[in-house]
Image: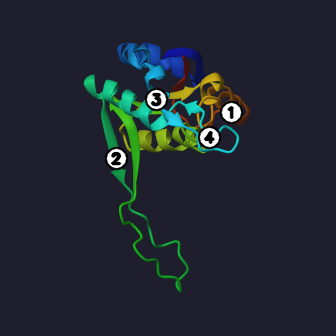
């Protein structure tokens, strides 16, 4: 795969090139090592494109995971301890904390990386919530988000978001005082 687009959110490019230059180089190498053509393995069951061969996001994610793990990046899960104090006195929740967690795909030397070939809401959540949470917990100081460009997303199942849409929304949203520096890579063939 190759990087087709780069977006710097909250000075992400400046911060990452200054403090994490070697890790950014690793991430770029990983992207280049993933051969997307090997992952066009999903036969569509959708009405609009029955039988068409599509890129398989699960398979792509596995390929990225393999490359990141080879280089010492680690996955981080944080257990969620939900509070009962916000419920009304007459409500009793069942199994409140059963198995709940938040997860960062890859972390190395306080740089977090998320690979997202899924629905649009996950991209926004990763950058505007999850990375902020993992920063507040002391696990990361900056992040990189890897997402498909529109040309690639159109060769996946419907509903997969893409770099161009994501960047437009972040531009319209603006930066908040709690946002961390994030570099967003739009990847394609």
Mark 1 to mark 3 CA distance (whole Å)? 17 Å
Mark 3, Cα crowd under 10 Å, few <14 / some 14-19 / many 20+, is: many
Q: Mark 2 points at which residue?
A: 77
Residue 84's place in the image compared with 26, above or below, is below
Q: Position of residue 179 (x, y in %)?
A: 55, 36
Provide the secondary structure element on which disc 4 rests: helix
Q: Mark 3 points at which residue?
A: 143
The reply to whether residue 132 is visible in this rendering is: yes
Q: What is the residue that sits farthest to the right in this orientation?
A: 172
Q: Which circle, 4 or 1, is nearer the viewer?
A: 4
Q: How is the image coloured?
A: rainbow
Mark 1 to mark 2 CA distance (whole Å)? 28 Å
Q: Earlier in the sequence, mark 3 or mark 4?
A: 4
Provide the secondary structure element on which disc 1 rests: loop
Residue found at x 38% / y 19%: 30
Mark 4, Cα crowd under 10 Å, few <14 / some 14-19 / many 20+, is: some
Q: Earlier in the sequence, mark 1 or mark 2?
A: 2
Provide the secondary structure element on which disc 3 rests: strand
Residue found at x 39% / y 73%: 95
Q: Mark 4 points at which residue?
A: 120
Q: Which circle, 1 or 3, is nearer the viewer?
A: 3
**Dot label at residue 174:** 1
Q: Earlier in the sequence, mark 3 or mark 2?
A: 2
Mark 2, Cα crowd under 10 Å, few <14 / some 14-19 / many 20+, is: few
């Amino acid at each position: 795969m190759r990087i087709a687009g780069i977006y710097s959110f909250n000075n992400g490019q400046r911060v990452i090139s200054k403090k994490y230059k070697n890790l950014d180089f690793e991430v770029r190498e990983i992207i280049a090592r993933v051969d997307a053509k090997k992952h066009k393995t999903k036969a569509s069951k959708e009405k609009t494109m029955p039988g068409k061969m599509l890129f398989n996001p699960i398979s792509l994610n596995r390929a990225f995971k393999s490359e990141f793990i080879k280089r010492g990046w680690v996955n981080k899960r944080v257990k969620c301890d939900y509070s009962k104090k916000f419920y009304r006195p007459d409500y009793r929740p069942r199994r409140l904390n059963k198995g709940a967690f938040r997860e960062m795909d890859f972390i190395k030397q306080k740089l977090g990386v998320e690979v997202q070939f899924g629905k649009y809401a996950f991209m926004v959540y990763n950058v505007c919530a999850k990375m902020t949470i993992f920063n507040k917990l002391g696990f990361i100081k900056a992040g990189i988000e890897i997402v498909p460009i529109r040309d690639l997303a159109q060769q996946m199942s419907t509903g997969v978001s893409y770099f161009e849409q994501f960047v437009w929304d972040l531009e319209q949203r603006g930066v908040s005082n709690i946002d961390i520096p994030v570099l967003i890579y739009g990847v394609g063939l």
